[in-house]
Image (tube, helix red, strand yellow):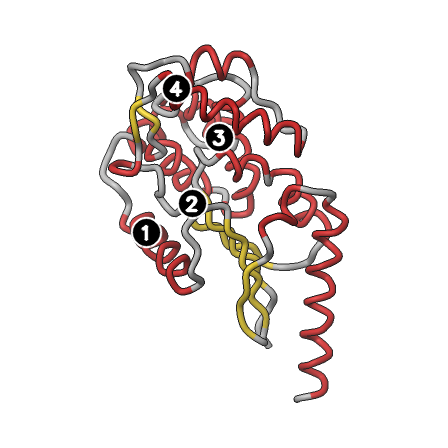
Amino acid sequence: MTQPTLTLLFDPLCGWCYAAQPGLDALAQNLDVQWHLLPTGLFAGDGGQTMTTTKREYFWSNDQRIEQLTGQVFSQAYYDDVLSDFTSRFDSWLPTKAWYLITEQQPAAGLEVLHAIQQLRYVAGRQSADIEALADVAEKYGLERESFLISLQGPTPPALTEAISQARQLMQSHRVGGVPTLLLETASGSGIVPNHMLYHEPTQLIGAIQSALQNDHQSAQNNP
């Protein structure tokens, strides 16, 4: 029988992915399921953009909405040093690659590493291209700093390219165009966890998935 799996499709520079942190943490702490995290690369490379005053105010307005809804912190340092820096690109490639390199060594820490990288931006106010800040996270999870920096600035690992391709195929097959997308896979098949549930009281989210798992278990017993 297939073990239930939660697959998270994400981009580390997605504000709504950061907003989902409390709900995702609650799921990880309360459900006995496998996790599969896949970066989508939505805001990497050609998907990135240069910041402008108009974009800054749009992002900040959206971020304030997220903070009111979820309690997630968007600091003044983030506004001053990230959103107001019009010389730097909004590009998630280096954070995505850093996440991959760290979790390659610490596969059980995927959610933790993602949250740590998100907090660099939204709390500490560090730019996405700040390789020293990303190296700080790598060291926290036991990676040797200089080796990590060499890998971060080196060729793209084929497995990362494959993971991004897999994520985009899942987005296409489930007809979703944005992140975060959380998929629940059981023996009965795969389906999308409704996004709005990620941003409210985690008890409701946990209960909904527990109910789906129970229904799947009962179905398996009735149809051996």
Q: What secondary structure is marked by label 3?
A: helix
Per the image, the residue denoted by label 4 is: 132
Instruction: Answer with the quarter of the image where residue 155 lies.
Output: top left
Q: How far apart are marks 2 and 4 (CA)?
A: 19 Å
Question: Mark 3 near mark 2, Cβ–Cβ under 8 Å?
Answer: no
The residue carrying pointer 2 sits among few (fewer than 14), some (14 to 19) or many (20 or more) residues within 10 Å by Cα, namely some
The quarter of the image holding the N terminus is bottom right
Q: How far apart are marks 3 and 2 (CA)?
A: 15 Å
Q: What secondary structure is marked by label 1?
A: helix
Query: Of residues 51 and 188, which is closer to you in this image?
Result: 51
**Mark 1 or mark 4, which is nearer the start of the sequence?**
4
Image coords of residue 212 (percent x, y): 69, 67
Q: Which residue is drawn at the image coordinates 69% and 42% (left, top)?
A: 200
**Mark 4 or mark 2, which is nearer the start of the sequence?**
2
Q: Residue 117 carries which label?
A: 3
Q: Which residue is drawn at the image coordinates 36% and 58% (left, top)?
A: 166
Question: Mark 1 near mark 2, Cβ–Cβ under 8 Å?
Answer: yes
Say which of marks 1 and 2 sits in front.
Answer: 1
Per the image, the residue denoted by label 2 is: 104
Q: How far apart are marks 3 and 4 (CA)?
A: 12 Å
